[in-house]
Image (cartoon, coloured by chain):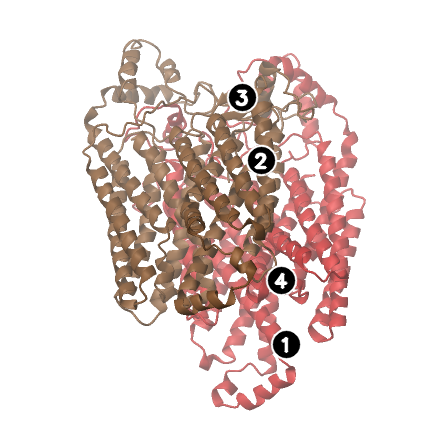
Chain colours: A brown, B red
Amino acid sequence: MTEEPVQKDSEIRRSNSSMGCGHKDDKASLASSQIAPYSHQPSTPASKEVWKKGGRMFSILLAVHLALLACTLVSSGAFEKIAVHDYDVFFLLTVMMLIVIIWIIFYLVSTARCPDAILCKDSHAGPIWLRGGLILFAIFSLVMDVFKIGYYSSFYSCLSAIKIIYPIVQAIFVVVQTYFLWISAKDCVHVHLNVTRCGLMLTLTTNLAVWMSAVTDESVHKAHSKLKKNVTDDLLRWLLKVGMRSSSAEVCNCNSQICQIFKNGYFWLYPFNIEYSLFASAMVYVMWKNVGRFIDHHSHHIHHLKFKLFRRTFFVGIVLGLIILVSGLGVLIVYEVQVNSSTESSKKSQALTMYYIFNIVCLGLMSLVCIGGSVIYRFDKRDMDRHKNPTRTLDVALLMGAALGQYAISYYSIVAIVASTPRDAISALNLTYALLMIAQHTFQNIFIIEGLHRQPPKEDHKHGSRQKDLCGLTFVNVSAVSLRVPDGGSTLAPSTAPGTEASLPSDLVRSLTAPKKMNWRRKCLREISMFLLLSNIILWIMPAFGARPHFDNDTELNFYGDSMWPAIVDICLPFGIFYRMHAVASLLEVYIMS
Amino acid sequence: MTEEPVQKDSEIRRSNSSMGCGHKDDKASLASSQIAPYSHQPSTPASKEVWKKGGRMFSILLAVHLALLACTLVSSGAFEKIAVHDYDVFFLLTVMMLIVIIWIIFYLVSTARCPDAILCKDSHAGPIWLRGGLILFAIFSLVMDVFKIGYYSSFYSCLSAIKIIYPIVQAIFVVVQTYFLWISAKDCVHVHLNVTRCGLMLTLTTNLAVWMSAVTDESVHKAHSKLKKNVTDDLLRWLLKVGMRSSSAEVCNCNSQICQIFKNGYFWLYPFNIEYSLFASAMVYVMWKNVGRFIDHHSHHIHHLKFKLFRRTFFVGIVLGLIILVSGLGVLIVYEVQVNSSTESSKKSQALTMYYIFNIVCLGLMSLVCIGGSVIYRFDKRDMDRHKNPTRTLDVALLMGAALGQYAISYYSIVAIVASTPRDAISALNLTYALLMIAQHTFQNIFIIEGLHRQPPKEDHKHGSRQKDLCGLTFVNVSAVSLRVPDGGSTLAPSTAPGTEASLPSDLVRSLTAPKKMNWRRKCLREISMFLLLSNIILWIMPAFGARPHFDNDTELNFYGDSMWPAIVDICLPFGIFYRMHAVASLLEVYIMS
C-alpha cells in the first residue's frame, strides 16, 4: 500500500449528521482544501479539510468484522460435524442483503438526488463491457434463484422457511444491485460521505459473503457426489429402498423429475452467480475508492474508445482462439462422460491423458504468444500511462492476487509428483501441466499489466488534429506548447525544472514526423489479445463446470491425504477460476486499447 | 493499493548490464525525469524515464514464487504422514540464506561504494529503536543457534549433515544481515536497480521462509508435547525402557542432561528468532520501496526526535503498566505450572479462570485507555501529516493485517461458545475475553494510526524560531510566506487556487497566538502510550512463551474437531503474536511523537 497523493483527491467535510444534503459552499471549500496541504499550522475548526484515510477507516473496520463473521459461519457450516447449519448462514446473508437493499434505495432516492452529490464522474470506472458482463451474469443468477426456489418448494414442509426466503431475497438483491451499479458505477459521491462509504463496504462484504457461501456450497456438493459414486450403486439403492421408507424421508426427498431438474439446474448455474458476485464486488470497490474524490478534468482526458471487433485484423487470433475454444468444449464433454460414468481405471486414465495433453498444448501456445506480445511491447514507442486510475490498480492487484491460487495448487502438485515414487506417463503429463500453468500465469500477467499501462493510440483522428494545432503554433514559445499537451502530473503548475526548453522541441518534432510504419505491431497485439481472450474463456469453462483432474488423478490425494489436499484445492481453485474471468475482462481492455 | 505519485519519485534508467556503476549524468537526467510526466508524446529512446512499476514487477514475481515454494515445503514437512522431511526444508533455507549472504556482500562491497549509489536517505526508515530491537533479537537468535548446534551435535552420527549445517549458516546469516541493516536501512539506492531489487526481495523471502519454518516447528513441538502428556506417563516410561533398548535408539536419543538443556533452551528462544525475522522483513521491505526513490528535501523536513523516557510525565502510565507487567508474569508462571503439571480438571479450570480474569481486566483497561486517547486526538489541534512515508504505510498495513489473525481466532471462539450447550462460568469468561480481544485490537489500531499520522510537536524550539521568522516578514506578500512554510504537497509550485490570500493570514496569526495550554493533552497521550506499550509487552510474552488457553479449554476443540481448530490457531496465532510486538514498536513511536 502506498500513500495517496493528497492534492488531487482532497475531500471536504460536510454536515453529515442531519442526513440532509451537504451545504453548497463549493468554490470556497474547494479552494481551502487545495490550500491545506501547503499550510502547516495547527488546523483550526474553520478548516474543512479532513483526513481521508481516517474517513475510510471506520468503513474498513465494519467490512473486516462482517467479512470475518461471515467467513466463520460459512466455513463452520460446511462441515457436517460442526453444529453450525446452513440456515444460520442463510439467515446472516439474508439480513445483510436486506440492509444493503435498504441502503441502495436510500442512496438512489436521497443521496444521488442531492445538489452537488456527484460533482464529477470517473470515466475509467465501470466500462460498458464490465457492466454488460454484470447484466449477463445477473440474468443467469436470476434463473438460478428461480431454480432454487423451485427445488426447495418441492419439499417446503420439512425445511425451515429461511431456505425459501433466501433465494427470493437474493433475486431482489440482484435486481436492485444491478440497476444501482448500471447507473452509479462512475459516481464520485460528495455528500453523506460516511454513510456512503459504510453502505458501499457493506455491499462489498455482502457480495463476498455470497461468493464464499456459493463456493463452499459447490465444493460440498462436489464432494458429496464423489462420495456417493464411490459407494457401490447397488448398496446405495438398497439403502434407499429399505432405510428411507419412513414417511418423512418420502416427502423430503427429491425424487420427482422436475425436482431433479431444478437441483441439477441450479448447480450448473452456480458459476455465473459466483462471477456475478465478484464483478459486483470489484465495481463497488472502485466506487468506494472514488467517494470524496475530485477528478482534475484537465489531467483526465477521457478516451471514447469504441469496441470494433472486426477492425483491420488478419483474423488469425480469432480463428485460432475459436479452434481452441471448440476443441476444448469437446474435450470437456468427453472427459466428464468418461470420468463420471465408467468405473474402469484405464478409461479414466485415458480421459486424464486427453485432458492434460489438451491443456499442455493450449498453455504452451498461450505462453509463447504472451512472450511474443511482451517483446512487441518492448519495442513499442507509446508512453506509459501514469494517471491515478483506481480501476486499473484494482485490476492489476486482482490479477496478481488471484494468480496466487493457481500458483499454490501447482506448487503443491509439483512437490507431490516429484516426491512420489511411481513415475508413469500421467505423472509426467501432470508435472508438465503444473509447470506450464505457472509459466502461463506469469507471462500473461506481465503481458496484461504492460498492456493496461500503455497510452491508448492517438493516431486515428487525434494525430491529424494535433498536427494541425502544432503547425499553427510554430512561432509560439515552446513552454506554452508544453502546457497544451495533456497534463501528466497532478497540478496545473508550469514545469519549473531546468532543461525543459532544451528537451521538448526535439520530442515534438519527432512526434510530428512519427511514421505509421508500426501499424503491424498494433495488429499483432490485437491478434494476440483476441487469441488469449478466447483461450482464457475455455480455461474458465473447464474448472467452472466441473472438471477436477486434481481429484481424478490420485497422486496428490495419496500424497497429502484426504483432508489436506481437498482443503488446498477448495480454497485455492475459486481464485484460479476467478483469475480466468478477470483476465478475459482485462484482455478485452488491452484489445480495445491496442 | 493505490497508484503512486509520479513526480516526486521518478527514477532513472542506468546502464545495469555491465555490473559497473551507473554513469553519472545527474542533473540532466533528473531534469528529464521531472519533465517526462508532463509530456505525452510517444517516448523516444533518448528519454531515460522508465516505468517504476515495471521495474518492480520482476522482483515481486521472484519473491512470490520463492515464497510459495517455501510455503509448500514447510507446510508439507509439518505432517509426518507426508513424504517431505524437515531436512528438505532445511536444505532449501540453507541455499536461500547462502545466496542472500553472497548478495549482501556484493551490495556492501560493490553497489554501496559506487559514486552516486545513494543520493539520498529516507530519514523515516530504520529508526534507532527498530535497529536496536533488531540487534537485541539477533543476539538471542545467535544464542538459539548455539543451543541448536549443541543439541544436534549430541547425536550427529544418526542425523543428516544438513541439520547441523543449517544453524551454522543461520548464525552467519543473522550476523551479516544485522550488520547490513544497521548501516544501510536508510539507503535509497540508485545503481544496479534490478539486482538490488531482486536481492532485497530474496532477503525478504528468506526471512519470511525462516519465520514460517520456525513457527511450524514450534507448533509441531507444542502438539507433540501435549500428545505425550495425554499418554499415561507410566506407559510412556515403560515403552521407553522396553522398546528403545536397541542400539540406534540409545545413541539417537536426547537423554543426557546437557542435551535436554540445549533442547529446552532453543525452544524457549524461538520467539526471539521469530521476531528477528519479522523485524528484518519489515526493514528490508522499506529498503525495497526506497530503491530508485528521490526524496524531495524541501518537503522532507527531518525530525530529530530524541527518546526522552523521563520527560515531564505523571508516571501514572509507567507505574500502572509495570504493575500489569509484573502481575502478568506471575499469572503466566502459575498458569503454566498448574496446567502442565496437574492432571486434575479442577486445578486446570482454576488456572484458566485466573488467566481469563487477568486478561479481561487488562484488555478492558487498555480498551478504555485507547478510547480516551482517541477522544483526546479529536480535540488535538495538530495537523495531519500526509507526506509519503513508506515506513508508516507499512506500519499501518501490518497493524491492520496482523490484527486479522486474532480477530479470526476470536470470531471462531465466539461462534463455538454461543453454539455449544454447556454454558458455565468458564464459557462466560471465554466469551468476554474473545469479545474484549476484538474491541481492544480495534480501539488500539485506531489510536495508533491516529497517533502516527500527527505532525510531531513543534512547540519546543521550532516554534520560537518560526515566530521570529514571521515577525520579520510582516510586510511581505503573504503568498511568499506560504512558500516558506514546509511544503505539504509534492511540488514546489506556488498555489494558484483562489482564496489563498483570504485564508492564510488568519491561520498564521492564530498559530502565532496559539497558547501552550494544551500541554496536559500531550502528557496524557504520553501516559497512555506508555501504559499501552507495557501492556502489549505482557500480552506478547504470554502466548509467545507458551500459554495456550485455546487448547487447554476444550470448548472450541470439541466444537470444531481435532484438525480444524488446531489449524485455525496454528495459522492465526503467529500473526496475533506478531501484532503485539509490532504494536510495541508503533506505540514507542507514538510516545516519542506526542
Q: How far apart are marks 1 and 4 (CA)?
A: 22 Å
**Circle number at residue A100:** 2
Disc 2: host chain: A
* Label pair 2/4, CB-CB below 8 angstroms: no
Tell me the crowding category of disc 4: few under 14, some 14 to 19, or many 20 or more residues within 10 angstroms, Cα based.
Answer: many
Q: How far apart are marks 1 and 3 (CA)?
A: 66 Å
* Label pair 3/2, CB-CB below 8 angstroms: no
**Circle number at residue B229:** 1
Q: Name the residue under label 3.
A: A118
Nearest to N terminus: mark 3 or mark 2:
2
Q: Distance between the residues labelled 2 and 4?
A: 32 Å
Q: Are marks 1 and 4 on the same chain?
A: yes
* Label pair 3/4, CB-CB below 8 angstroms: no
Q: Is residue B130 toward the left or the right of residue A495 in the image?
A: right
**Circle number at residue B559:** 4
The residue under the point 46% across, 45% down is B288
As rendered, which of B227 and A237 lies closer to the eye? A237
* Label pair 1/4, CB-CB below 8 angstroms: no
The residue under the point 41% across, 47% down is A265
Amino acid carrying mark 1 in the image: Lys
Tell me the crowding category of disc 3: few under 14, some 14 to 19, or many 20 or more residues within 10 angstroms, Cα based.
Answer: many
Q: Is residue A82 above or below residue B530?
A: below
Q: Can residue B127 be seen in this view?
A: no
Q: Is residue A197 toward the left or the right of residue B350 in the image?
A: left
Secondary structure of residue under mark 4: helix
Disc 4: host chain: B
The number of callouts visible is 4
